[in-house]
Amino acid sequence: MRSKSEAAFESAKAVMPGGVNSPVRAYRAVGGTPFFADKGEGPYLWDIDGNRYVDYLLSWGPLIWGHAHPEIVKAVTEAAVKGTSFGVPTELETRMARLVVDIVPSVDVVRMVNSGTEATMSALRLARAFTKRPCIVKFEGCYHGHADSLLVKAGSGVATFGLPDSPGVTPQTAEGTLTVPYNDIPAIEALFEQRGEQIAAVIVEPVAGNMGCIRPKDGFLQKLRALTQEYGALLIFDEVMTGFRVALGGAQARFGIQPDLTTMGKVIGAGLPVGAYGGRRDIMAMVAPEGPVYQAGTLSGNPLAMAAGVVALEMLKNAAAGGLYDRMQDYGQKLVETFVAEGKRRGIPVSGHAIGGMFGLFFRDASPENYEQASQCDKERYAQFFHAMLNNGVSFAPSQLESGFLSAVHGETELNLTQEAMVSAFRQVG
Ligand SMILES: *Cc1c(COP(=O)(O)O)cnc(C)c1O
């Protein structure tokens, strides 16, 4: 029963484009009506009709401490009482920056912003300024927020001049964005051979999470590091999703690679609007007011967001020492095993994998390695599975081409609930 949500969606559509403030929330990929959230607690989310869900969307990644964690709520509440924004520096900002610098291996200096989009947009501007070069390289199917130069998809071939992915992005803007398939080492080598002197930076999701959850092949990230170094380009790890999630220090800690710049978001704000970019001191020294590259924000370093982030990161530091990231991966692995076993039993092609606090479930015989393979996944079956799971009280992302997320507060009870729901859901997958 979701009649209240259905009515709420109708009201919303009258006053917001598609009824939502971010397109994926409208369920276009799976059909049906999104449920409207009433409240969350730990691993659970309740809709306005009173249905409860075990939540694996987790606000699209930020909620590694689950919903309404008491320590985070307390920190935000205490901060709010003292004032919600000042426009002058606070010590909280320095505490936050210190934590990020200590935790993320390649970050010497960091600037806080308000979203992942702002972080990547700013990092690219900085990379162009630092290298005095015009072009950036991104990978097909990687999402880096909605800045104009990043809304570009690839054509076919080894590398193409970018074509805008959205009306309103000018061809001139898109032209500076070169794209190659994810995990394709020969393609990136060929691109550098052709255009290496023009490339300011390669930006990559070190574990891709926006075309399903896709792991980097062995040697792929190492190759990006070597090529960028050879040609004098910068390597930007977009860790907006993977940061503090696939390992405490992000993918760069997990794979032992030092990018020049790192973008962060999601987990770093524990559910409040935060992003950040940081990296090598000599590069970050170009950011205003220390250097000439302009970038600013009225609400950047907001005290509520910093209070939440500081507590979340401090708790993660402790939990990581106690094995949190292995525990999340074990949990994800068990979900994947049940998913794959149930699919196979019914002769349905399925695959999946888990990495730290992320996982991917695919209706395809093998986990995809790039966007082309990801787009071959069976969308119909995912839609059936998704709605059956929802009806069984489990909320996954409303598209297979998104990652699943785990939290520190998902435990045995939720795992069992989810596995049982899966067994039953597969009866409705044709
Ligand atoms: C979510 C995401 C972004 C965009 O972050 P917003 O806060 O939504 O602007 C950028 N890069 C990656 C890898 C993301 O997952």
Image: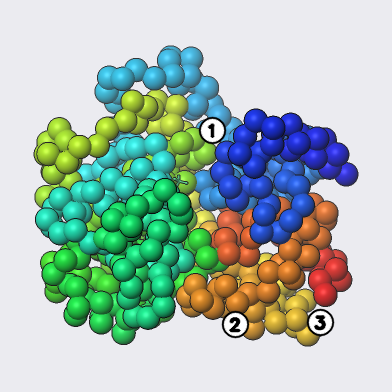
- Residue 159 appears in the rendering: yes
* Front one among 107 and 3: 3
Question: Is the distance from the Cβ of mark 1 to the nearest ligand 1 atom less than 8 Å?
Answer: no
According to the picture, the residue beneath numbered tag 3 turns out to be 346
Residue 397 horizontal side relative to residue 34, left or right: left
Q: Residues within 10 Å of mark 1 (few under 14, many from 20)?
A: some
Residue 199 horizontal side relative to residue 187, left or right: left
User: Mark 1 or 3 closer to N-term?
Assistant: 1
Mark linked to residue 366: 2
User: Mark 2 or 3 closer to N-term?
Assistant: 3
Q: Secondary structure at mark 2?
A: loop
User: Mark 1 or 2 closer to N-term?
Assistant: 1
Residue 355 horizontal side relative to residue 48, left or right: left
Q: Secondary structure at mark 1?
A: helix
x and y, in percent, of residue 53 in the image? 75, 48
Identify whether 86 is placed above or below 46: above
Q: Amino acid at mark 1?
A: Glu
Q: Residues within 10 Å of mark 2 (few under 14, many from 20)?
A: some
Identify whether 215 is placed above or below 409: below
Residue found at x 60% / y 50%? 24
- Alpha-carbon span between mark 1 and mark 2: 40 Å
Which quarter shows the N terminus?
top right
Q: Secondary structure at mark 3?
A: loop
* Front one among 24 and 316: 24
- Alpha-carbon span between mark 2 and mark 3: 16 Å
According to the picture, the residue beneath numbered tag 1 turns out to be 71
Residue found at x 31% / y 84%? 186
x and y, in percent, of residue 175 in the image? 29, 61
x and y, in percent, of residue 72 in the image? 52, 33
Q: Residues within 10 Å of mark 3 (few under 14, many from 20)?
A: few
